[in-house]
Amino acid sequence: PKWAWSSEWKEVVAEPKLMQEQDGPSFKRKPTRGLLGSGKSSVSLEEMLPARSSVFVFRVDPLWRMMGIDSDSARASSLTHFRGSVADEAFIQDSMDMERQTCCLQRLVVHPETRLRVLWVLFGSCLLCYDMIALPLQLASIWEAEQSMQVSCLAFWVADVLLSFFTGFYKDGVVVMALGPSARAYMKGWFASDASIVALDIVALSVSSVDDSSQDALAFQMARLIRIMRFLRLMRFRRVVEIATRAFDSVESEAGLLVMRVCGLVTGILVLNHFIACAWYAIGVSGAAGPTWLAERDVSTTAHAYVCSFHWALTQFTPATQNIAPTTLQERLYACFVVLIALVVYSTFLGRMTSAMTQLLNLNTKHYQEEAMVRKFLGANKVSASLAQRVWQVRRQQQRAAALMQRVTMKEISTVFNMPGDLYKMLCHEMYQKSFLTMPLLQSTFLASDILTREFCSALEERTAAPVQELFFEGQVARSAMIFTAGTMKYSSRYNNESIDIRPLTWVSEPVLWGCWQRRGALMSTSITRWLDLEGSTFRSVFGQYADGCERHIMAKYAETFERFVDQAIVLDVYSPEQEEVISQMVERSVGTSARFNGSRRSSH
């Protein structure tokens, strides 16, 4: 009963126990009325832990007790487990060594998301954009690329084909880095088209010496045909699409995504007009059927002629004027063909632009309606300008707060599509690892254990609270520990005169991970707050399933010491700086025991 607790606590305050400082790790307790008595005291870890008090009754979960029933037996069992695991690791290592001996090229396989690979793909995309502009110009005899530039591009694409064999790929959200599957996936995918394009580039480069002045008609026709077939290079345009898709996926704002889509549509229209303009210039230069539009315009330079062609192409897609008209039958037929294409493309472009702008307006429809309602209310009631300004300030602050509250959680994302389990755990591990490993024991124990951290992070649940919201109250049975990631909050308890400001990356109610725990105070959010929940039963279940002998030994020692620490000290849901120092010493003791145990394991091995 609470009255019994209060009675016992008053007795402790009335008769404070003064402890002398001894050898070994110690901590200073801050003089706090109603918590530790008056006066400045220092106590060692050995002196603090043996005695037990009935002020707060806390018992660890039976799982931790079972791990620490017989320490010698546990060590022997862990040593046996370690020998078995060492044997397995040795077997795996030998197998990997044999694989390396049989296939030394495995070391050359790179991750598809490494910085070097991303830069390589970006450079290839730039070359593709260059080809998209240069190929029509070369085919229309407007501009000719340098021989060195062509050789450099060819060398890059030959190297790209070779490197594609040594690049990992994604399969069901998991990266496959094995050489054999990576090479087979590329062979079944884009190898045929890439190899064909590279072979065609080699042939085109070898016959580039045959120009329009060649006397051999057959060689001239073959050279022209190969130059036209060089348009097959644009099959590599899929890489630009992949880069654009990644760019779209990285945009977090819906408005920004719509703007990027509009820019993509405009870029597509410009590229299409570039191709049409080059073809229109080529028809004008030929002059096979009489005077062409170029002869009528009396254009002096090639650049001026290309600009006029581009202007003519743009006017076919938009309701604009121009003074260039077809004069020959070929030009007239080509102009009719372009008009038909423009009719379809422009209507599609206009429809998508209208849809994008409508979506952009719909994003803020509710916001505009609410502002119109507030403005109508202020005007109808003739509110003064100063008071109306305050109303608008409060309104905008609430809007910003509501926007921050609209945070999509992992639980909501998992309901949108059927996410594979491994991918879900990888996402949770990347998002929550930094916050989860802030507990001292976890920093020392699980930092090298990716399996445990991944399982624990996938068990975390993200939550959000509005300002001035009570997260829990005193006496409530705790079922989960809390890791605060953002926001501000205050913790108050009747065992502490001053409220405590909770900072981000702080654990609250950590004892629930080790046993049954009741809240020792109340927690109130003072702003928009986010935290991660970790249920104690889930923590113990995951640990019992995935921990090895060494980690079990550390946890058993720590849980035993932690139980004695809670019974001796007045532990609240939030640790004081002095208690954090003691817990750090407890962690060092537990991990130090495991280190000596690991030494015996290594010597036995």
Image (cartoon, rainbow, N blue to C red):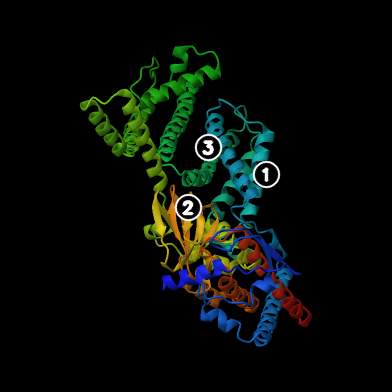
The answer to which quarter of the image holds residue 447 is: bottom right
Mark 3, mark 1: which one is toward the viewer? 1
Secondary structure beneath disc 3? helix
Can you tell which quarter of the image residue 585 is in?
Answer: bottom right
Crowd tier of the residue under label 3, counting other residues whose Cα lies within 10 Å: few below 14, some 14–19, many 20 or above: some
User: Label 3: which residue?
Assistant: 228
Q: Secondary structure at mark 1?
A: helix
When the figure is inspected, residue 564 is found, relative to residue 183, above or below; the finding is below
The residue closer to the viewer here, 390 or 272, is 390
The earlier-in-sequence mark between 2 and 3 is 3
* Of callouts 3 and 1, the N-terminal one: 1
Task: Say which amino acid is labelled 2.
Answer: Lys
Which residue is identified by label 2? 490
Labels 2, 3: front one: 2
Q: Quadrant of the N terminus?
A: bottom left
Which kind of residue does numbered mark 1 sit on? Ala
Can residue 505 be seen in the rendering of this structure? yes
Q: Position of residue 345 (x, y in %)?
A: 35, 34
Q: CA distance from mark 2 to mark 3?
A: 73 Å
Give how far across and how far down residue 249 sits, in percent. 47, 47
In which quadrant is the C terminus drawn?
bottom right
Residue 240 lies, in percent from the top left, at 52, 43
Which of pointers 1 and 2 lies earlier in the amino acid sequence? 1
Rendered image: mark on residue 381: none
Q: Nearer the viewer, residue 560 or 550?
A: 560
Look at 38% across and 16% down and name the residue there.
322
Check the image and report above or below for 444 versus 135. Answer: below
Which residue is under mark 1? Answer: 155
